[in-house]
Image: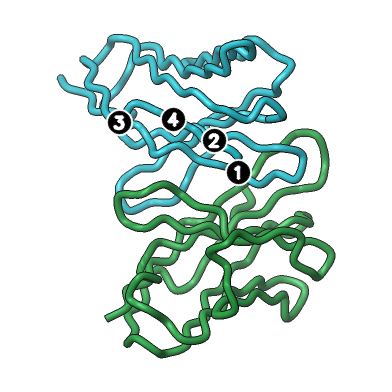
Chain colours: A cyan, B green
Amino acid sequence: GEDVEQSLFLSVREGDSSVINCTYTDSSSTYLYWYKQEPGAGLQLLTYIFSNMDMKQDQRLTVLLNKKDKHLSLRIADTQTGDSAIYFCAESTEDYKLSFGAGTTVTVRA
Amino acid sequence: EPEVTQTPSHQVTQMGQEVILRCVPISNHLYFYWYRQILGQKVEFLVSFYNNEISEKSEIFDDQFSVERPDGSNFTLKIRSTKLEDSAMYFCASSEAGPRGELFFGEGSRLTVL
């Protein structure tokens, strides 16, 4: 079965980089995702990476995938107060069913 | 930018009542999903729907739950007789068939069962 684990909390100073880590168990995962959830809001897709990629960069976001260790990370450069949210790692297989981690609450302090 | 819309944003109901949550997926998408998030817990998969039938469902999706695509635009989740433990945020999602793998979520419908 699928199991996705994340650390629950991260506190970072404004302007620093944030790194959120995730591990997953299903080696047949095809896509791995990062979603952002602001208080009271839905799930916003931030970025995703296909399982045959090692890295993907999109503006301030960098995703690193270590498929051997089943480890995914999201780096947010120059973290801003608007980046305060819960970040969910998720994995999927061919049918696009997602298994989510519990979410990492990122708090950006001035 | 196209988006998935859900109604109502919040519904309060009595235990044992029927509830219908509505979703309008993105118009050219072919795969539709319901997920739920009990407060403080993980987002959990409920059901996926493709070609007018359920393609996969989780063990949470028991006989009390049903989904329907009554017309070309709406996708509904019905809970026949709500229980206290059905209180959660319910997210609808849709995706376009293809390799890009993007799943777009709605803002969610918060269901409170008293």
How far apart are the alpha carbons under marks 1 and 4?
14 Å
Image position of A7 with respect to A93: above or below: above
Q: Residue furthest front?
A: A1
Does residue B51 appear to the left or right of A25 in the view shown? right
How far apart are the alpha carbons under marks 3 and 1?
19 Å
Find numbered disc 3 in the image and state the secondary structure of the residue it sits on. Answer: loop
How far apart are the alpha carbons under marks 2 and 4?
9 Å
Q: Quadrant of the C terminus of chain A?
A: top left
Which amino acid lies under the numbered mark 4 shown in the image of this protein?
Glu
Looking at the image, is mark 1 or mark 4 nearer the viewer? 4
Q: Identify which residue, A80 or A11, lies in the foreground.
A: A11
Instruction: Please name the residue that numbered disc 1 is placed on.
Output: A98
How far apart are the alpha carbons under marks 3 and 2?
14 Å
Q: Chain of mark 3?
A: A
* Discs 3, 4: same chain: yes
| Residue at point 68%, 57% (across, down) | B26
Q: Tell me, for residue A8, which label it has, or none.
A: 3
Residue A67: percent from left, percent from top: 63, 14
* Discs 3, 2: same chain: yes
Q: Quadrant of the N terminus of chain A?
A: top right
Q: Tell me, for residue A5, which label it has, or none.
A: 4
| Classed neighbour count for the residue bearing mark 4: other residues with Cα under 10 Å, few (<14), some (14–19), many (≥20) | some
* Discs 1, 4: same chain: yes
Residue B18: percent from left, percent from top: 47, 88
Instruction: Please name the residue that numbered disc 2 is placed on.
Output: A90
Q: Earlier in the sequence, mark 3 or mark 1?
A: 3
